[in-house]
């Protein structure tokens, strides 16, 4: 089983390698390498921005990837935790999720209090998946993210 680099998304790394062949990131320094799923899913990334500065990147390869704010009391830990960037606490704990269906990805608002938008459009209807395309901008309150399909 090959490894995918959590930093750049390169998916052809040998499972025994310590560094990504594409970007030379050391797997141990950025997190544990993620195995490429056998389902044919094309890996994607969510890049989180504060202003024009990239503050975090997440690899998306699961069937469901949750986005929101963590809460240790209620034991809520989203896959994409926006807590550090949510100064006003306006992001719902479970806010949205990304669904992977083969080579396509969709985003769905999970009945959040303040909504989710794509490419500065109107707020998404709750529980209605909308297909994501490469370089789509996802906005959850004041947090901006970019959806990037890995090559």
Image (cartoon, rainbow, N blue to C red):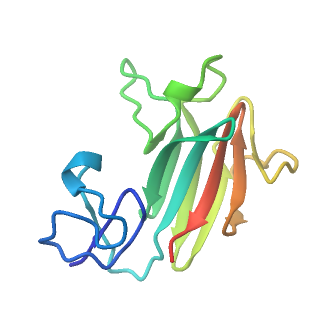
Q: Quadrant of the N terminus?
A: bottom left
Q: Nearer the viewer, residue 50 or 86?
A: 50
Quarter of the figure with residue 3: bottom left
Q: Is residue 111 visible?
A: no
Give the residue at the far left of this rendering: 16
Q: Is residue 139 left or right of residue 11?
A: right
| Residue that appears at 33% across and 74% down | 37
Q: Is residue 49 visible?
A: yes
Query: Does 85 sit above or below residue 130?
Result: above
| Residue that appears at 78% across and 49% down | 124
Give the residue at the far right of this rendering: 122
What percent of the width, then of the height, locates residue 43? 46, 70
| Residue that appears at 84% across and 48% down | 120
Query: Does 95 sit above or below residue 41?
Result: above
What percent of the width, then of the height, locates residue 67? 54, 43
What percent of the width, then of the height, locates residue 93? 54, 30
Q: Is residue 76 left or right of residue 26?
A: right
Q: Is residue 78 left or right of residue 35?
A: right
Query: Does 36 sit above or below residue 50?
Result: below
| Residue that appears at 69% across and 69% down | 133
Q: How many marks?
A: 0
What percent of the width, then of the height, locates residue 24? 30, 63
Q: Is residue 47 left or right of residue 6?
A: right
Give the residue at the far front of this rendering: 24
């Amino acid at each position: 089983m090959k490894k995918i680099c959590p930093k750049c998304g390169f998916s052809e790394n040998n499972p025994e390698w310590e560094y990504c062949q594409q970007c030379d990131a050391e797997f141990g320094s950025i997190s544990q390498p993620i195995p490429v799923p056998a389902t044919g899913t094309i890996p994607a990334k969510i890049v989180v921005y504060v202003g024009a500065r990239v503050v975090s990147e997440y690899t998306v390869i699961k069937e469901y990837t949750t986005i929101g704010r963590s809460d240790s009391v209620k034991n809520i830990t989203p896959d994409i935790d926006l807590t550090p960037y949510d100064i006003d606490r306006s992001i719902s704990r479970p806010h949205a999720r990304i669904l992977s269906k083969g080579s396509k990805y969709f985003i769905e608002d999970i009945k959040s209090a303040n909504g989710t938008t794509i490419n500065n459009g109107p707020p998404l209807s709750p529980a209605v998946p909308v297909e994501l395309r490469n370089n789509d901008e996802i906005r959850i309150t004041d947090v901006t993210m970019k959806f990037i399909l890995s090559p």
